[in-house]
Image (cartoon, rainbow, N blue to C red):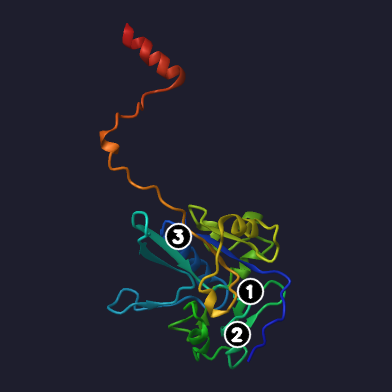
Amino acid sequence: MTTLPATTDRKLGLVIDLDTCVGCHACVIACKGWNTQNYGAPLADADAYGAEPVGAFLNRVHSFEVQPGDGPAQIVHFPKSCLHCDDAPCVTVCPTGASYKRAEDGIVLVNEDDCIGCGLCAWACPYGAREQDPVEKVMKKCTLCVDRIYNDTLPPEDREPACVRTCPTGARHFGDLADPESAVSRLVAERGGFDLMPEQGTAPVNKYLPPRDRDTLDVLAPLLPPVDEGPKGFLGWLDRTLERI
């Protein structure tokens, strides 16, 4: 079994803004595409167009309807992948040492050459973040696109996880959460970022930003005078002048 490092030099991870995620699944598609053709065994699909399709995904988006006590119901889209926990049970339970956490950056990875596909890591993970590839029969998980973030042949703007790079609303952020001055750490501090299921004691590195309160619907709004949506400034003056001619 693998021993977790006592400390890590950095804590690379994701900060996900639940307020701006629109559930478009662009991150899911980007993750599937990148990890099918690069790091490790491809993310296979079996019987993709048949009656019982099955496939491996490293990132999924779940959608929930939330009913606040003092406001209207709202839909919250909740992306979820490996959280690269400091106290990762998936690492310590692995019988072959295939699962490990890197001391240099805190990323949790799987050495697929040593993985026997027993699934113990999936049972140990309280977040359901590990999946067995249906073809290769090895355990797959988010790598934080380790083959992108250290790839000097890529432009600097591309050296971040594919899910972060592709998010159209900027709901996903990547950085070093061990550095209190990093952009992601400041974002967590300013927005009250939280751990997923902290009662599990896994100390996840990834953080979530809570959705903001939505405005309540004013039932009297239809009875109010309409808002003037005519042209403003010079065009407004010109429009009013021409009306007098």
Relative depth, front residue between 38 and 220 = 220
Vertical comparison of 95 with 233: above or below: below
Residue at far top of view: 245
Vertical comparison of 74 with 40: above or below: above
The residue shown at (29%, 29%) is: 225
The residue shown at (36%, 24%) is: 230
Lower position in the chain sequence, tag 1 or tag 2: 2
Residue 228 is left or right of residue 2, and the answer is left
Q: Are marks 1 and 2 in contact (CB under 8 Å)?
A: no
Q: Quadrant of residue 64?
A: bottom left
Residue placed under numbered mark 3 in the picture: 26
Q: What residue type is labelled 1?
A: Ile
**Can you see residue 126?**
yes
Lower position in the chain sequence, tag 3 or tag 2: 3
Q: Which amino acid does label 3 sit on?
A: Ala
Q: Where is residue 228 in the image (x, y as percent from the top left)?
A: 35, 26
Lower position in the chain sequence, tag 1 or tag 3: 3
Quote the CA–CA distance across marks 1 and 2: 11 Å
**Can you see residue 155?**
no
Relative depth, front residue between 58 and 147 = 58
Residue 163 is left or right of residue 182, and the answer is left
Relative depth, front residue between 217 and 42 = 217
Q: Residues within 10 Å of mark 3 (few under 14, many from 20)?
A: some
Secondary structure found at label 1: loop
Residue placed under numbered mark 2 in the picture: 91
Secondary structure found at label 2: helix
| Image mark for residue 107 | 1
Pick the quarter of the image with the C terminus: top left
The residue shown at (69%, 62%) is: 152
Observer-side mark, 3 or 2, equals: 2
